Every structure is written in C-alpha cells, then in structure tokens.
Image (cartoon, rainbow, N blue to C red):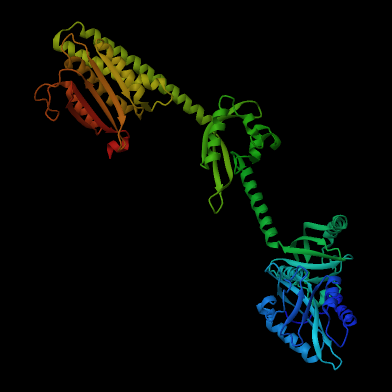
Amino acid sequence: MGAVTKSASTAAPESLAPALKAQVPAPRAISEEHFRAFVNASSDVVYRMSPDWKQMHQLDGHGFLSDTVQADDNWLDHYIHPDDRAVVQAAVAKAIRTRSLFELEHRVRCADGNFGWTLSRAVPILDASGDITEWLGAARDITARRETEVALRASEERLQRVLETEAIGVLFFNHDGTLIGANDVFLKMTGWSRAEVESGSLDWRRMTPPEWVAASEAEMGTLQHTGRLGPYEKEYLRKDGSRSWMLFAGRDLGDGTIVEFAADISALKKAEAALRESEAQFRGMADSLPQLAWMADEKGWIYWYNKRWYEYTGTRLEEMEGWGWRSVHHPDHVDRAVAGIQRSWDSGEPWEDTFPLRGADGEYRWFLSRAEPIRNSEGRVTRWFGTNTDITERYQREELQKLLIHEVSHRVKNSLSIVSALLQLQARTLEDAPRRALEDASSRVRVVATVHDQLWRQSDASEVDLASFLSSLAAAIGTSGAQHATVVEVEPALVSADLAVRLGLLINELVTNAYKYAYAPGEDGEVRVAGQHTTDGRYRVDVSDLGRGLPTGFDLSQPRPSFGMRVITSVASQLNGNLAVSPTERGTRFTLEFPLTESSRTA
C-alpha cells in the first residue's frame, strides 16, 4: 500500500518536478506570491513543508483536502490515515536523507471527513550551499482509480473462482477453432493435458465426433452473427477415444478470444435413456392389457392412451388428449363422471366410477373406471395412471338380478297385503279377544309387507333407509288410529332388510299399543316416533305419547301376559338393543338403542 507506484497514470504528477524547479528562485525560499500563483495555475492539491517535515507551512486543498488556516505541526494526525502514517514517515525520512523527490500513494482524510487516496509528490528547495530550505509538493486525488483497481481485482478473483469450480469446465479458443486455454475441470473431463492445450495442437473439430461437426459448425455461424454460443448439447471426444455428453454455452470476448463453459451431462443422458427404455417397456406392457388404459399429468391432463383404447373408441390422440375423452362418454353420465374425477385431481385421492363409453361401432358398453395417483419421493402427485375395465356382461347380470329381486319383493308385498286384508276382514266377524288377535296379526303382516314395498321401490334391495321406511310404516299404521296424530322425525340411516323387518315389528307394537292404551276411549292424542344417531355409533328410537301413563307396577323385566309386549322385548333382544321405558311430564316414552351393523349386533 505504501510502495511507490510508477505507471502511466502517474506521468502527469512526475512532470511537476521540472516545473517546480523552474519556478523556484534558488537559493532563497519561495515567496507567498510565487506559491499563490502556482496554486492558481494548478488543479492539484499544493502544499509546502518545513525542511524536516515537522511542520506543514501551507496547504491549498482544492476542495479535496481541507485548507490550512495556519502552520500545522500535527499534519500527520490531521490528514494521514492511521494505517498509512508509518509508511509516510518512512518515505519522508528517505527523501530527506537522499535530498530527492518524495513520492507515495497513500490514504488521506478528505474535506468531507471521509478517507480517500492521493498520489503525493514533493521536491526539496535547496539554498546555494545545497541545504534544504523547504519542500514544495502537489497531491492528486486518485480515489476513483484506486476503487476501480479494487473492483477489478475483485472481479478477477471472482473470475478465478469460476474457473476453479469443480463442476464447470471452461475453455478458450480463437476464431479458427484452436484451443488456447482451459481450466483443470475441463482437462479432467477430457483427459487432455495442459501442455497439449498450450501447444496449440488441439481444436474443437479434433475433439468433436464426425456426426456432430455439422451441428457445431452451425453454432459457430450463430456466434459470428450474435456473439453468443448455445446453450447446446453434443457428444465430445475424450483423449482416450471415449465419448461424453456435454452442455456448452459461451460468447465472443471481443478480443479474438471465445470463452465456452462446459458441463458434463453424461449421467443425465444415461438417466434419460433409462427412463425412455422404462417408459417403452411400460407402454408395451400397457398395450398388452385387455383394459383400456391412460396416463395424465399431475393436473389431470391426459396425454397417453394404450392401443386398446384406440381400438375400442376408434379415435386418435389428437381427439382424446386433455379432456377430449368426454366425447365418447354417454351424455347422461358425463357430467357426473367429470365432477367425480375432478374431485380426485384436486384432492389427490384415488378415483373410481362406473359409466358407459361409446365404441367405434356407436354402441355403448359399461366400464368400471379407476385412476391411481403416482407420487414422487416427497409425496407430491406427478401423474395419474387409469384403466377402464369392460363390465357390460356383469352389469347386465346385476341389473337383471335387481329386476328379479324387485319383482319378487313386489309380489311378496302384494301377497302379504292380501293376507293382512283377509285377516282384517275376518276380524270384523268376531268380537272381543279373537277380533283383537286377528287385528294384531293383520297389523304385523302389514309391517312385513311395508318392508318389501320399500325394497322393490329402491335401487338397492339389500338395504333400507330408516327415514323413509319408518315414515311409510307410521302412515300405514296410522290408518288403524285415524283419530290420533302420528308424528315421525327420523334421521336417515341405512340398515339391512332383516333389521328393518324386526325394527318395524317393534315400532308397530309400540305405536298400536299407544293408540289402544295411552288415551281413553274416544279421546284423540299424539304419538311421536323419533330416531337419531348416538355419539357411540349406535341408533336410538323413541316412541312417546301424551296419554295417561303406564299402569301401576309396570315392569319391563317381568314376564307379561300380553303377546305384543313379548314381541317387543323379543325383538329388542334380537337387535342386541337396550330397551327402556320412562314416564314423561305427560305420557310415556319407550326407548330402544341398538347397533346399526350386523357385526356389532353379533359381536
């Protein structure tokens, strides 16, 4: 930092010495008038120092440094950077000892309080005997130049770090293609030595396989027009004759040199080749599947179908890609299918649906369709694989089976309704206990008929919805107690047909008992049937009235002579339910809690 720097940039200050000598009237000291004239003629800082440099007589800073108001004995502290004071003192001592030019680049405190750089020169003024009478100096602001030099060094260091990177090869060649320089990484990539590069015997044509020369020539043509190369990929020849894939990019530096950066992408190319082979094997396997198969990206855009799809639909990829598959869906089902699969696209959950697809012959066949998400190591969906399996024959068999079951249920219902009606007619010919017995039997047969009526009216004959079933049952039971209001408030719940029959018998007994015994003869009232899910996964049914309450001493745990009560307790046990009875503010409430599933009832 304190070394003397002699360069082209310091030539102008060097010319100051002759000028100073020409203007100094030896052997006496410079007059104030001469110093002021010199200051006015100069654009540099001008200063005068005592013979031993202990005192600064005068300094005109020209806005760069602060002017002296009076002689300054502490100029070193006032003007010189602390880290440079020793260097300045050493240079001063040498100049005094040799009676020669003082010249040094160092840091100074500027007029604004910040530190800057200056090139300072001072010449000794000698008297007739050769003794120094004072020193006359000039200093130039070189802060900008020093900052530029620092930035240039930093840039060169950055470039050097780039050249020394372990991943990127860097090579330099001239416009005729001769390699003139390369970093160690490139030499390691190719196997060539630095001596071979510096010999000028290598050019890009020698290191390029014959089939890649034309492509490289085209890139060189682009360089001539744009000053840039690539990025482009090609194979490169190593010294041992083997090949490696490289990615190149570069530019013309404008000084007759072209720089190119090279990355070895052989591993990437190998992985791409393995992936292509894997996909080819997969597609070959998918084409051999009897199902229709397809693949979609992470957003659900279908980009591939197997051969079986095209054979069945008679379409082409251009028609089917993306959402084009909707055109072969049955118009009655397409909106439902689209909504369902979109939910899976959005949620990442597997998809399944059944719908008809139109074949090349214009006929529709039923397909069971599924799609599974394919996820990466981070769990993110990257694509979907889907299949459509033809289930037309199975679907037709199931539909026929449903039709037969519905027909059987309908006929059973009609037959039971006839039996119930016959029992009711027979009861009208009797009195007292025999009549009540037949009426009760008719009511119980009607319950079973109601279950079968519910079964044949719905699509699934194996399950019954309690909400609609109990509403229909209560309406049927209500015909025997028309003077009473029967209110039904039941939450939906799917149960087996067997459970529905048993629960229906129990409800029938409880409701008809309320009609008969809760209210006095001729008195009307309300009977309420309520059903709701419990927090433990069971179901609760309440049958309540606003009548006169239970007889004194009524106890469910004790055997009852009434057939109806025996039916109630027996069915509650079959349902694995808990039956309870309790008085209300007005009337009575029977409560049954039971599991909805067969496994829970038999556990």
What's the residue at 12%, 22% (across, down)? 561
Tally of marks: 0
Q: In which quarter of the image is residue 518?
A: top left
Nearest to the observer: residue 291 or residue 222 = 222
The C terminus: image quadrant: top left
Front residue of this view, candidates 25 and 148: 25
Q: Which residue lies furthest to the left in this view?
A: 553
Horizontal arrangement in the rendering, residue 315 relative to residue 232 (left or right): left
Residue 525 horizontal side relative to residue 289, left or right: left
Between residue 133 and residue 415, name the one nearer to us.
Answer: 133
The reply to whether residue 73 is visible in this rendering is: yes
Look at 88% across and 64% down and name the residue there.
175
Residue 445 in picture, x, y percent from top left: 27, 17
What is the quadrant of residue 387 in the picture?
Answer: top right
Quadrant containing the N terminus is bottom right
Is 535 placed above or below 129 here?
Answer: above
Kindly tell me whether residue 188 is visible in this rendering. no
In the displayed structure, would residue 144 be above or below residue 353?
Answer: below
User: Which residue is at the far bottom?
Assistant: 129
416 relative to 185, above or below: above
Give x and y (percent) for residue 202.
Answer: 85, 71
Which x, y percent locates residue 46? Answer: 80, 75
Q: Position of residue 8 (x, y in %)?
A: 86, 75
* Residue 54: quarter of image: bottom right
Horizontal placement of 307 versus 234: left or right? left
